[in-house]
C-alpha cells in the first residue's frame, strides 16, 4: 500500500478496533482469542485494502472475515468446542460483585453454549445492531435462515442461562 | 424482554475489556508477512508445476515412443485397421486421436491376411483364404473414414478369397446389436468368386474405382450368424471408397 492507503487504513483501524474486538469477544468468550481474531480480520483487510473499491463496505468486510475466522476456528479438531451441561464460568452471587458484573459474566458464559453460527447471528443482531438483511449479507445466507437461527440461538441462550436472567426467558 | 434490553445486555457484556494487544504496526507487519508467505508458496507451487509438467512430458514422450509404431493407422479415434507391427502387436488402443491423413506413412512391410507365423493378423488367421494381399493402409483409411464410430476396433481377417494382386482391409464393426466384419477389397479383376465365396449371410456391393483400375468390393459379413453390420449403407460406403482409387 502507498502512503495514502496506509493513512486511510490507520484511520479506519483506530476508529473500529475496539468495536471489532468486542464482537470477537462475544463470539469466542475470551479476550486473548478475541484479539487474535480481530487482528486476523484487520490483517486480511490490510492485504486487500486496495482491492476494496467500496470503502463504505469496510465494516461489512471486517465483520464477515471475523465471523468466518471464529466459525472456522471452532470447527478445527484441536479447537472444536464441546458443549457441556455445566457452564464453565458460573456467575457468582450478586452480593459478592454486583449485579451488573454477574449479568455480564452469565451472558458471556451462556453465549459460549450457543452453537457458533447461531451465536454469530445473535452478536450481529444485538451487539452490532444489524437488521435481518444486514446479518444475512454478513453471513452470506438468506433472511429466512437468519430468522430461524435467531430463534434457535435465543432458545439456546435461554436454556444456557437457566434462571440466571429471568427477564430473558420471554425474549424472542 | 425486548430486543432493546437484549442489546443493552450484549453491549454491557462486551463493554470493558483489557487493552488491545495489537496496534496498526502489528497488523501491517503481519499483513506483509502473510503476503510474503503466499508469494513464496505460489512460487514454490509454480516450480512444482513446472517440474510436474516436465516429468509428464518426459514420461509421455517415453510412453508414446514405446507405444506408437511409426505410421500406425487409426481412424476417427474409434476404428483401427487390423494393421499390426511385425511382432503382431496391435496399437490401435494406445492412440488417442485420429491419424488418418498420412496413408503413405504406413509401414512398407505388412503382414498378409491369412498369413501364418509372425506377422499374422490375429488369432483366427487360420480361417482366412490366401490371396487377399497385404492389409492396405490407404484402403484402411478410406474405409475407416466412411464407417461410423461404432466401438472398439479389433483386428480380424476377412474370410473371402481374393484375386491375385488384390488389396484389402477388414474392420470388426459393432452396429447396434449387430456385429461383424466390413471388408473392402480392391480387386484387379471383376471376379465374382470373391462374393460367391463369402461367408453365409454376407452382403456386398461392388463397382469400379474412379480410376477404372480396380473393382471395388465392400462386404458386410456377420461375426456370429444373422445379419452383418451396416448392410443398408454398403452402397454409400462403396461409392466413397471407390472415388478415392
Image (spheres, helix red, strand yellow):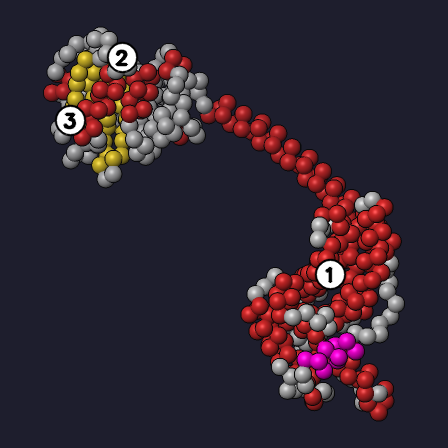
| Numbered mark located on residue B125 in the image | none
Report which residue position mark 3 lands on: B203
Report which residue position mark 2 lands on: B245
Q: Secondary structure at mark 2?
A: loop
Closer to the camera in the image, B159 or B105: B105
Q: Secondary structure at mark 1?
A: helix
| Image location of residue A41, percent across then percent down | 75, 58
How packed is label 1: few (under 14 Cα within 10 Å), some, or many (20 or more)? Answer: some
Q: On the rendered structure, is A92 left or right of A78?
A: right
Q: Which residues are magenta?
A: B3-12
How packed is label 3: few (under 14 Cα within 10 Å), some, or many (20 or more)? Answer: many
Q: Is residue B118 above or below residue A104?
A: above
The part of the image, by quadrant, that contains residue B23 is bottom right
Check the residue under mark 1 and report the chain it is in. Answer: A
Could you give the CA–CA distance between mark 2 and mark 1, rounded to whole angstroms?
Answer: 77 Å
Report which residue position mark 1 lands on: A59
Instruction: Examine the rendering and report whether any part of residue B196 can be seen.
Output: yes
Instruction: Examine the rendering and report whether any part of residue B116 can be seen.
Output: no
Amino acid at each position: 500500500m502507498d502512503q495514502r492507503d496506509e493513512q486511510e487504513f490507520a484511520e479506519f483501524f483506530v476508529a473500529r478496533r475496539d468495536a471489532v474486538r468486542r464482537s470477537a469477544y462475544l463470539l469466542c468468550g475470551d479476550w486473548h482469542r478475541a484479539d487474535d481474531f480481530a487482528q486476523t480480520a484487520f490483517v486480511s483487510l490490510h492485504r486487500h485494502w486496495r482491492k476494496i473499491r467500496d470503502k463504505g463496505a469496510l465494516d461489512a468486510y471486517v465483520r464477515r472475515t471475523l465471523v468466518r475466522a471464529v466459525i472456522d476456528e471452532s470447527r478445527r479438531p484441536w479447537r472444536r468446542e464441546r458443549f457441556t451441561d455445566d457452564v464453565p464460568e458460573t456467575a457468582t452471587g450478586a452480593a459478592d460483585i454486583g449485579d451488573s458484573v454477574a449479568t455480564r459474566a452469565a451472558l458471556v458464559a451462556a453465549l459460549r453454549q450457543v452453537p457458533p453460527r447461531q451465536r454469530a447471528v445473535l452478536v450481529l443482531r444485538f451487539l452490532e445492531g444489524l437488521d435481518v438483511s444486514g446479518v444475512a449479507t454478513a453471513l452470506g445466507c438468506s433472511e429466512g435462515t437468519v430468522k430461524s437461527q435467531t430463534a434457535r440461538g435465543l432458545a439456546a441462550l435461554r436454556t444456557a442461562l437457566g434462571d440466571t436472567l429471568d427477564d430473558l426467558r420471554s425474549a424472542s | 424482554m425486548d430486543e432493546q434490553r437484549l442489546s443493552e445486555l450484549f453491549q454491557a457484556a462486551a463493554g470493558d475489556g483489557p487493552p488491545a494487544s495489537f496496534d496498526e504496526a502489528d497488523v501491517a507487519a503481519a499483513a506483509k508477512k502473510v503476503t510474503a508467505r503466499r508469494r513464496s508458496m505460489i512460487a514454490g507451487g509454480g516450480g512444482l508445476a513446472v517440474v510436474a509438467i516436465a516429468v509428464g512430458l518426459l514420461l509421455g514422450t517415453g510412453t508414446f515412443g514405446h507405444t506408437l509404431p511409426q505410421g500406425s493407422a487409426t481412424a476417427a479415434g474409434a476404428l483401427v485397421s487390423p494393421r499390426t507391427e511385425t511382432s503382431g502387436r496391435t496399437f490401435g488402443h494406445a492412440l488417442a486421436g485420429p491419424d488418418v491423413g498420412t496413408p503413405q506413412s504406413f509401414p512398407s512391410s505388412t503382414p498378409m491376411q491369412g498369413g501364418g507365423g509372425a506377422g499374422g493378423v490375429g488369432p483366427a488367421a487360420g480361417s482366412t483364404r490366401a490371396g487377399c494381399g497385404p492389409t492396405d493402409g490407404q484402403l484402411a483409411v478410406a474405409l475407416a473414414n466412411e464407417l461410423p464410430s461404432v466401438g472398439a476396433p479389433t483386428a480380424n481377417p476377412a474370410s473371402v478369397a481374393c484375386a491375385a494382386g488384390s488389396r484389402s482391409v477388414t474392420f470388426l464393426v459393432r452396429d447396434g446389436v449387430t456385429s461383424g466384419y466390413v471388408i473392402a477389397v480392391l480387386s484387379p479383376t471383376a471376379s465374382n468368386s470373391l462374393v460367391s465365396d463369402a461367408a453365409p449371410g454376407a452382403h456386398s456391393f461392388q463397382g469400379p474405382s474412379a480410376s477404372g483400375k480396380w473393382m471395388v468390393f465392400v462386404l458386410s459379413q456377420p461375426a456370429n450368424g444373422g445379419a452383418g453390420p451396416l448392410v443398408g449403407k454398403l452402397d454409400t460406403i462403396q461409392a466413397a471408397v471407390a472415388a478415392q482409387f
